[in-house]
Amino acid sequence: MRNAECLRGTFWSFTPNSEFRIPHSQGFTLLEVLLAMSILAVLLTVIYSSFSTASRSVASAEALRDETDLARTLIAKLSQDIENAYCGQVPNGFVVFFGKKEEVETEGVKRRHDNLALTTLTNWRRPDSKETEILEADYYFKEKAGGKGYSLMRREKRELNKDFPPLEGGVEYEITDQVDELQLRYSNDGSNWVDDSGSKSSCVRPTVVEITLVLLSGKQYSTEVRAQDAL
């Protein structure tokens, strides 16, 4: 009885010794460390996933912006040349407006690679040169080396004279290799459309030109351009 009364009147505690804890140690158990590492790994995975998703979104937005800028630049340049197309008299030279439908077939799919050659009043005259504001511009496609796709080309002839007939001479350069299709249609009333216009030996400018541009991504851009004196 006395022993029992002593036990009831005395405060005592008991902490079992664990095989993972050193008695009287203030550190963490192995189980606690493993649990903390697991939580940290989950948090790092979530953070990395968030940053990765954001990075992909930024890259996608930048690609879309670059693609849109490219399409706008190409259409703006074509539109400027067409709006300022010139079929008047040129001293000792030739003028031309010649649009021709062209198709290529790759992997059983036909694509439009139309050509357009025209005389236009968009030349920036270099100082101390005999150039005028008139130049001959030619848009066409050229197959890349090894047959790996096509590049959209532009040829410019700044000095027009009879030594170089239309579509001859000048300097060519690549505009871009990101164009999958370029379709041009022509009309004199905005209702009836044809795929070809003019010839190499004549210069008859249509009233309206429809431009349809398709990039390699599949994005399509279209517009209609009117000659300045037809507005």
Image (cartoon, grey):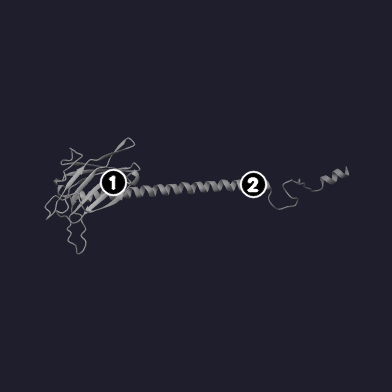
How far apart marks 1 and 2 lie (CA) works out to: 63 Å
Q: Which residue is mark 2?
A: 34
Q: Secondary structure at mark 2?
A: helix
Q: Which residue is mark 1?
A: 142
Q: Which tag, 1 or 2, sits closer to the chain's start?
A: 2
Q: Is 198 or 85 nearer to us in this picture?
A: 198
Q: Residue furthest right?
A: 2
User: CB under 8 Å between callouts 1 and 2?
Assistant: no
Q: Position of residue 23 (x, y in %)?
A: 75, 50
Q: Is 114 or 34 nearer to us in this picture?
A: 114
Q: Position of residue 55 (x, y in %)?
A: 45, 49
- Answer above or below: position of 219 versus 137: above
Res 84 seen here: no
The amino acid type of the residue labelled 1 equals Lys
Q: Is 75 or 163 nearer to us in this picture?
A: 163
Query: Mark 1: few, some, or many residues within 10 Å (few <14, many ≥20)?
Result: some
Q: Secondary structure at mark 1?
A: strand
> Which corner quadrant of the image does residue 216 belong to?
top left
